[in-house]
Image (cartoon, rainbow, N blue to C red):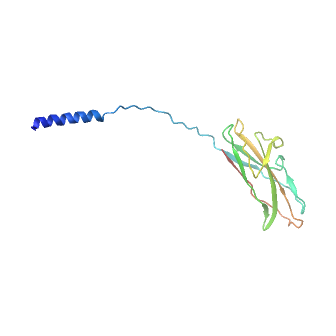
Amino acid sequence: MNTASKLTLAALALSVLGTAAQAQVNNASITATATVQQPINVTGAQGLSFGNVLPGIAKTVLATDGTNAGRWDVTGQASSLVNLSFTLPGNLQSGANLLPIANFTGSYNTANNAAAATTFVASTGASPTLSVTGALFVWIGAQVNPATNQPAGVYTAPVTLTVTY
């Protein structure tokens, strides 16, 4: 085969390969969107106060007692469902002395009104909805059970509320 024929054959082969390698191209775009919600803010507003307790006499504070129940103020994304869960102590402590605490109850309301709040079992938690302004008030009550020989002292323990979307 002569050189001219080889060149013509090579050109024809490249032309066929170039045509075969071409493909139809098409594309489209979409928009990726994310809405960042307002973060949850939880503030301890009032401690759970049993006041003066006498040895051998149990004392209860109800979650609907706006004066003595513990209270947290919650803010977040308006009208959003949240989950409430607690870390609850089994005892209050004064030095090495322990005072049993139990029977925790909770309540919540979108207004700062404990008496009209919805109650729930604190150990189970609850799933309320924040108000249209993003507010929620949460209260907790419990019962202390001092022994008849309970040593005098100021007994304390942390009670933690965790709020999640």
Number of marks: 0
- Identify the residue at image location x=87%, y=56%: 59
- Relative to residue 28, is residue 157 drawn left or right? right
- Measured as percent of width and height from the top left, residue 66 is found at 83, 46
Considering depth in this image, is 68 or 23 the residue closer to the camera?
23
Q: Quadrant of residue 52?
A: bottom right
Outermost residue toward the left in this view: 2
- Identify the residue at image location x=69%, y=41%: 81
- Measured as percent of width and height from the top left, residue 43 is found at 71, 48
- Identify the residue at image location x=75%, y=43%: 137
Outermost residue toward the front in this view: 1
Considering depth in this image, is 143 or 67 the residue closer to the camera?
143
- Identify the residue at image location x=12%, y=35%: 5
Considering depth in this image, is 143 or 96 the residue closer to the camera?
143
Q: Quadrant of residue 149?
A: bottom right
Relative height, residue 64 to residue 87 (above, below): above
- Measured as percent of width and height from the top left, residue 76 is found at 67, 41
Query: Which quarter of the rendering shows the C terminus?
Result: top right
Considering depth in this image, is 126 or 101 the residue closer to the camera?
126
Query: Which quarter of the rendering shows the N terminus?
Result: top left
